Image (tube, rainbow, N blue to C red):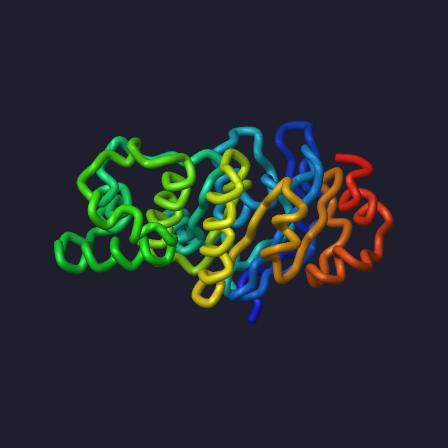
Amino acid sequence: MVIFSIKGLDIWFGSVYALKKLTMDIQANEILSVIGPANSGKTTFLRMLNRLNDLNPNFKMSGNIKFEGSDIREIDTELLRKKVGMVFALPLPLPLSIFDNVAYGVRMHGLRNKNSTAKIVEEALKEAYLWDEVKDRMNESAFKLSGGQQQRLCIARTLAVQPQVILFDEPCSGLDPISTAKVEDAMVKLKQKYTIVLVTNNVKQAARVGDRTAFFLGGELIELDKTDKIFTAPQDKRTDGYIRGKFG
């Protein structure tokens, strides 16, 4: 099932032509890895899916993006961002307890029942592969967690509001290999319930977790295919060159 349908999308920031004639679909319950060098349009593409680009006063777009059949410009932005959550490169825990960090979004959306909130928090932490490490520390400050734990806490905070799509913007860029592996394990498990779009500068990570991979270059989508095909038999020599580390 198609969850995002993108047709003829152009994006500018002032005079900068950031994304050019993009047409593609994102399937439900897949991990779509998005790779490409700096300034290739990856993050612009990702931020378009929940309209974060709208916050830039120089942003302009043409073309069409539909989420579950509806034009995203006609969906209330608060509702869209609840359904399409985002995890950023650097973990951004709130200056609150571990419990209150995960419960924050739930409470913002109006849930006040303590028992219901506690169940949602526990489930979100389990889905983020963090529960066993923090279940006896729930009242501690989130800042006492390691970097990798803080990133999984941010994933849990996103999951707690029950999105349909999770956008990951280089979520492991500052993490050690063990923490990275835990985040990747969580992603693979999460795709059973959620659609995941992962922007990563780590081509090996894209190969490990992606069902499909999209290669962007100079604001254009160069190639999109099943991940094993992209990494073993790409159709475009530029894709092959990037994967082999010849540029980027």
Q: Which residue sits furthest bottom?
A: 1
The C terminus sits in image quarter:
top right
Residue 149 image point, x, y percent: 37, 41
Q: Which residue sits furthest right?
A: 237
Q: Quadrant of residue 114?
A: bottom left
Q: Which residue sits furthest front?
A: 178
The foreground one among 99 and 208 is 208
Q: Quadrant of residue 91?
A: top left
User: Does 189 sit left or right of 142 as displayed?
Assistant: right
User: Does 212 sit left or right of 57 as displayed?
Assistant: right
Residue 12 image point, x, y percent: 65, 35
The N terminus sits in image quarter:
bottom right
**26 up-or-down from 238: above or below:** below
**207 up-or-down from 154: above or below:** below
User: Does 116 sit left or right of 133 as displayed?
Assistant: left
Residue 116 image point, x, y percent: 17, 60
Look at 30% across and 52% down and name the residue there.
131
The foreground one among 134 and 241 is 134
**218 up-or-down from 206: above or below:** above
The foreground one among 156 and 18 is 156
Residue 206 image point, x, y percent: 63, 51
User: Does 149 sit left or right of 97 as displayed?
Assistant: right
Look at 25% across and 44% down and name the residue there.
104
Look at 46% across and 43% down and name the residue there.
179
The foreground one among 76 and 124 is 124
Q: How many marks?
A: 0
